[in-house]
Amino acid sequence: MGKFQKVYIEIGDVCGCECSFCPSLNLAKFGSMDLGLYEQILSQIRGKTRAICLHLLGDPLANLNLNKYLSLAYDKGFKIDLVTTGKYLRKHDFSTLSKAHQISFSLSAFVDKNAKFSKNHIDDLLAFCQFTQEIKSEIFINFRIQKFMINEPKFEMIKAKFEQFFGVKIGCNESRVRLAYKIFLVFKEYFEWREPNSQNPSKYCHGLISQIGIKSSGIVVPCCVDASASINLGNIGQNSLNEIINSPKAKAIIDGFKQGKAIENLCQKCEYKANLD
């Protein structure tokens, strides 16, 4: 097994949101990843990845045992990335979340037409920023918003709050704006989860080469986009990750990408830009 830039470990597939741009509502839910299985995964990938991200589709902060998952990874020296809507931010001690190397908050979920958040949601996010600044934390904080949402009234409200809190002027023409030390507002290109009609077999992807995903059920998938486990490579609770990655199916996918070819149907229909974000 080679070395990855990032391993995505879905510690729970529950989100609690119903965003119009997300396929979560149409997917069966497994729940939280078993802690024993999680420890096994950490042992297998230790020294074989630059970072772990505790997310594929679910919100890691929806897991009330988040502190246990963070502590196990933190104590083993992993750099931990969290991707969250921040909806459950107040259910956790801020010092617990500071064990992460990076937290990315989805503002898109808050701005979305189906959003159901506390009226104080943005204030809670800013309170977390204030906490990290007070303790001089080295954590990276990203606030992500999809570009097509920047003209929405909710984003105008967020922009005004950010400008007042951080004392900066925010322009929306850049890919990201530095709000404070290690705190950024990031403008993301829209990614369409629904599969387009056309297929493109000619492409390169980091799946299985620089990244890999593990669902909360233990199913291993090539990348962070395959939240539905369409490309089931095996279950890490039954076979080692090394065995799974060296299986004929996985090796065919890897060899295909190295030749600029997408072997799997899902990969041929995927429009996600090949990056490690």
Image (cartoon, grey):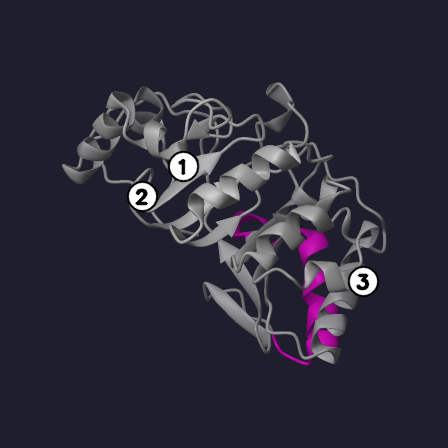
Q: Residue beneath label 1, please? A: 223
Cα gap from disc 3 to disc 2, whole angstroms = 36 Å
Residue numbers of the magenta segment: 146-169
Picture quarter containing residue 29?
top right
Q: In this view, does 26 lie above or below 202?
A: above
Q: In this view, does 257 lie to the left or right of 102?
A: left
143 or 168: nearer the eye? 143
Q: In this view, does 143 lie above or below 61?
A: below
Q: Is residue 45 above or below residue 233?
A: below
Neighbours of disc 3 within 10 Å: few (<14), some (14-19), many (20+): some
Residue 248 appears at what percent x and percent y?
24, 22
Q: Which mark is residue 271?
A: none
Which SS does the magenta portion mostly show? Answer: helix
Secondary structure at badge 3 equals: helix
- Is 44 included in the stretch rendered in magenta? no
Q: Are marks 2 and 1 in contact (CB under 8 Å)?
A: yes
Q: Do the residues labelled 3 and 2 touch (CB within 8 Å)?
A: no
Q: Residue 206 carries which label?
A: 2
Residue 164 appears at what percent x and percent y?
74, 76
Q: Which amino acid does label 1 sit on?
A: Cys
- Residue located 35% across and 20% down the image: 197
Decide if residue 252 is in sight here.
yes
The mark nearer the N terminus, 3 or 2, is: 3
Q: Residue beneath label 3, please? A: 123
